[in-house]
Image: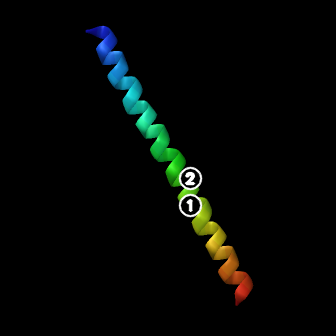
């Protein structure tokens, strides 16, 4: 039982970490687009 609970927590935290990484990448690409837009104008 305990092992199952730990595995669930582990996979949940892995999913959270993945979401964080994707969010960071999205923010980075948005910032790059902003910079390019500023340079173009």
**Left or right, residue 6 beside residue 25:** left
Numbered mark located on residue 14 in the image: none
Is label 1 in a helix, a strand or a loop?
A: helix
Q: In which quarter of the image is residue 31?
A: bottom right
The vertical placement of 41 against 36, above or below, is below
The vertical placement of 8 against 29, above or below, is above
Quadrant position of the C terminus in the picture: bottom right
Image spot of residue 24 (x, y percent): 56, 53
**Which residue reaches farthest right?**
39
Numbered mark located on residue 27 in the image: 1
Between 27 and 18, the residue placed more toward the observer is 18
Coloring applied to the structure: rainbow
User: Residue, x 69% and y 78% (percent of image)?
Assistant: 36
User: Residue, x 71% and y 87% (percent of image)?
Assistant: 40
The vertical placement of 5 against 25, above or below, is above
User: Residue, x 45% and y 46% (percent of image)?
Assistant: 19
Is label 2 in a helix, a strand or a loop?
A: helix
Numbered mark located on residue 24 in the image: 2
Image spot of residue 26 (x, y percent): 54, 59
**Which residue reaches farthest left?**
1
| Label 1, residues with CA under 10 Å away: few <14, some 14-19, many ≥20 | few
What distance separates the C-alpha of mark 2 from that of mark 1?
A: 5 Å
Quadrant position of the N terminus in the picture: top left
Circles 2 and 1, Cβ within 8 Å, touching? The answer is yes
**Which residue reaches farthest bottom?**
41
User: Residue, x 42% and y 31% (percent of image)?
Assistant: 13
């Amino acid at each position: 039982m305990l092992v199952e609970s730990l595995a669930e927590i582990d996979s949940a935290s892995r999913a959270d970490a993945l979401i964080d990484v994707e969010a960071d990448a999205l923010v980075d690409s948005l910032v790059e687009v902003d910079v390019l837009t500023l340079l173009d104008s």
